[in-house]
Image: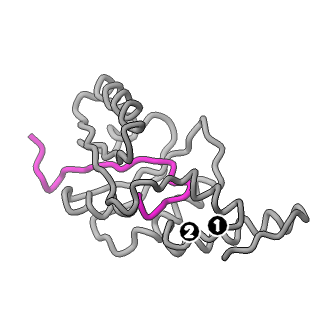
Amino acid sequence: MTQKSSFIAIFPGSFDPITMGHLDIIRRASTLFPKIIVAVADPLHKKTMFTLEERIKLVKESVQGIPNVEVQGFTGLLVDFAKKVGARAIIRGLRAVSDFEYEFKMAWMNRRMYPEVETIFLIPSEEYAYLASSLVKEIALLGKDVDGLVPPPVEKKIRETILGKYKESKGPSLEFD
């Protein structure tokens, strides 16, 4: 049996961008496990707003002050990354019943490929139950303020990225409320 002091849990995601809901799960998981690795994925099936390097940097800035949390990027299968770092648990957030079916299938597949890893489901705090990165991006692209939905470094980067893209394309100028 693994000693608690060496127990590593992974919280994976594309974090494009990291939201206050993600931070809520990370903070709460950090009280349950001695070490959390926030595993920033380079997804093959998604076009991201930010590069892998930008997302890693933003997540690192966002989790500063949580002492038992580190951030690493990865490509490929999550279970391969989990084996590489010696993780025994994968933390996943469940916002709604619609998340459950997908996450349940992934947990079974991960267990099949790496039986030593357990998937732990956490629900977000009620104030973040609706929050998704895709909604944050859509709101920002439509020119609305994302304050309170994402950590301050992410809000700043979103403003710079979106306003920069519109200035470069000479498209409409988006103003944030």
38 vs 121, left or right, is: right
Q: Amino acid at mark 1?
A: Ile
Which residue bears the numbered disc 2? 154
Magenta segment: does it hold 67? no
Q: Is residue 136 left or right of residue 33?
A: right
**Residue under the point 23% across and 42% down:** 88
The number of numbered discs placed on residues in the rendered structure image is 2
The percent position of residue 120, horizontal first and vertical second, equals 25, 43
Are the residues flagged by discs 1 and 2 in contact, CB closer than 8 Å? yes
Q: Position of residue 57 (x, y in %)?
A: 53, 65
**In the image, what residue occupies the spot 66% across and 44% down?**
47
Q: Which image quadrant for residue 144?
A: bottom right
Question: 9 above or below 61?
Answer: above
Q: Which residues are magenta?
A: 1-21
Looking at the rendered structure, the secondary structure element under dot 1 is helix
Front position in the image: 149 or 59:
149
Q: Position of residue 111 (x, y in %)?
A: 28, 28
Q: CA distance from mark 1 to mark 2?
A: 6 Å
Element carrying mark 2: helix
At 65% from the left edge and 63% from the top edge, which residue is drawn? Answer: 140
Picture layout, residue 8 above or below residue 111:
below
Q: Is residue 14 magenta?
A: yes
Relative depth, front residue between 80 and 60? 60
Q: Position of residue 123 (x, y in %)?
A: 30, 50
* Position of residue 149 in the picture relative to residue 171 (left or right): left
Q: Which residue is mark 1?
A: 158
- Viewer-proximal residue among 127 and 71: 127
